[in-house]
Image: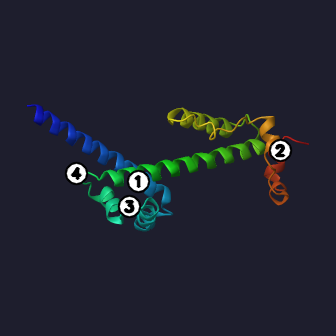
């Protein structure tokens, strides 16, 4: 009876690992794909970046295995975490730039700030490097302004709170 329970627990852990690997691989391929017909090439790029065989990424998408090797799982997890962190840093930069143009009270800036705070709470570490220090006056003085050829556009002039 004990052996049967132990085997069941191992089988459940394997299916959970496969499910997590599928989620990470799907996210990575979706983030990498440049359009509808680019899924195969995106899988190749993801496999190369994560140092995982292409066949493993393809199998996770189209023919889920019963179990997955620990090194494949850890490499997919590391690649997923790195890409997610890169995207959050990019969002933080874009939020600060949007705060410069539209103001810190704009709804897009508030929504992005809330998303960044939620991601910081969700992550294991503090995540303080993801959230901009403030989106008010200190952010305006610490960030460089966009080039003049971009700020000369009518929309930027209308959204700019400065005289």
Q: Is residue 151 left or right of residue 7?
A: right
| Residue farthest toward the left in the current orientation of the protein | 1
Is there CB contact under 8 Å for labels 3 and 1? yes
Task: Report the front residue among 89 and 126.
Answer: 126
Is there CB contact under 8 Å for labels 4 and 2? no
Q: Residues within 10 Å of mark 3 (few under 14, many from 20)?
A: some
Circle 1: element type:
helix
Determine which of the numbered discs, if any, sits on residue 160 in the image: 2
Q: Which residue is mark 1?
A: 75
Q: Position of residue 150 (x, y in %)?
A: 80, 57
Circle 4: element type:
loop
Q: Residues within 10 Å of mark 2 (few under 14, many from 20)?
A: some
Q: Which residue is mark 4?
A: 66
Give the spatial CA distance, label 4 vs label 1: 18 Å
Q: Residues within 10 Å of mark 1 (few under 14, many from 20)?
A: some
Sequence-first disc among 4 and 3: 3
Residue 125 image-quadrant placement:
top right
Give the spatial CA distance, label 4 vs label 2: 56 Å
Q: Which residue is mark 3?
A: 52
Give the spatial CA distance, label 2 vs label 3: 48 Å
Sequence-first disc among 3 and 1: 3
Circle 2: element type:
loop
For image coordinates 22% across by 51% down, the residue present is 66
| Vertical comparison of 14 with 47: above or below | above
Sequence-first disc among 2 and 3: 3
| Vertical comparison of 27 with 7: above or below | below
Q: Is residue 145 left or right of residue 130?
A: right
Closer to the camera: disc 4 or disc 3? 3
Q: Is residue 66 left or right of residue 114?
A: left
Circle 3: element type:
loop
Give the spatial CA distance, label 3 vs label 1: 7 Å
């Amino acid at each position: 009876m004990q052996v049967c329970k132990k085997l069941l627990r191992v089988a459940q852990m394997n299916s959970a690992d496969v499910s997590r690997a599928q989620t990470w691989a799907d996210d990575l391929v979706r983030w990498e794909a440049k359009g509808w017909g680019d899924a195969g090439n995106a899988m190749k790029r993801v496999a190369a970046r994560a140092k995982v065989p292409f066949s493993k990424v393809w199998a996770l998408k189209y023919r889920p295995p019963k179990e997955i090797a620990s090194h494949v799982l850890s490499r997919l997890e590391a690649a997923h975490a790195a890409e997610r962190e890169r995207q959050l840093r990019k969002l933080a930069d874009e939020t600060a730039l949007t705060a410069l143009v539209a103001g810190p009270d704009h709804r897009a800036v508030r929504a992005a700030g809330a998303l960044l705070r939620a991601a910081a709470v969700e992550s294991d570490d503090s995540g303080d490097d993801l959230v901009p220090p403030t989106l008010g006056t200190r952010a305006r003085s610490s960030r460089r302004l966009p080039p003049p050829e971009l700020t000369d556009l009518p929309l930027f002039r209308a959204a700019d709170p400065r005289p």
